[in-house]
Image (cartoon, rainbow, N blue to C red):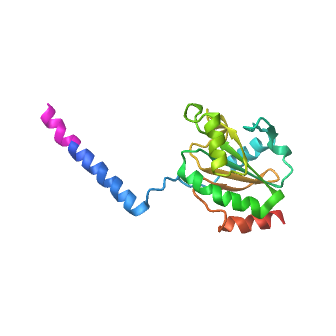
Amino acid sequence: MKSKIFPFLTVCTAFLSTALIIKFIFFGFDVNAKTFKLSAPQKTQYEGLFAKESLKIFEGETIKLSEIKEPLVMLNFWATWCIPCLKKFKSIKKLQSEFGEKIKVLGVNVDERSNLSIKEYKKFVNKNKLNFKSVLDPEANILSKFNLSHVPAIIIYHKGKVVHFSNNTKDYKHDKVLSDLKKTIQ
């Protein structure tokens, strides 16, 4: 019995290994969620959540999204283990400096509590010089409310209406989104 299964497993392992090597050669090591466009019902759902959702920030403050005074609000769904999420931080900082008081960035960190202590989280925030506040969502309750299954994901609202959605490694420093957002707030 062993002699019949072993060649089959060897062929399967060789096939999978070859497929992975080809994938890395052509597409690199970057792990991205698939990009998708928001449907009208998803957009309506996100806008409804904006109207009623309150987020308890790590530092203890509770923020009702609809009461944020800045015209632009960015929800940044991220995790410390997510390489594409970490790549976005630099462009998010640039976006914040570009828009100043016109944008409020809020992070939703989905690291499991067992994988990230409060002390480690603070250390991570300081090390990466994050200039936005985050909600800790270790059970992914907020992620689930938004029907998201992957990070990174970013939703940008203008006065409660969704104006941008991204679930890939979009660079906000050099992208058309930057100019579109400027037009939106004029």
* 121 inside magenta stretch: no
Relative to 89, is 10 above or below?
above
Residue at figure coordinates x 43%, y 61% from the top left: 27
Please name the residue shown 75% across and 58% down the image.
96
Residue 133, position as x, y percentages in the image: 73, 45
The reply to whether residue 109 is visible in this rendering is: no
Q: Which residue is at 82% across, 53% downward?
A: 159
Q: Quadrant of residue 7?
A: top left
Screen quadrant of the N terminus: top left
- Kindly report the secondary structure that dominates the magenta region of the rendered protein: helix
Q: Quadrant of residue 182?
A: bottom right
Q: Is residue 8 magenta?
A: yes
Where is residue 112 drawn, in percent x and y?
Answer: 58, 34
Q: Which residues are magenta?
A: 1-9
Can the viewer see residue 9 in this picture? yes
* Residue 84 x %, y %: 55, 53
Pick whichever, 158 or 70, lies toward us.
70
The quadrant where residue 63 appears? top right
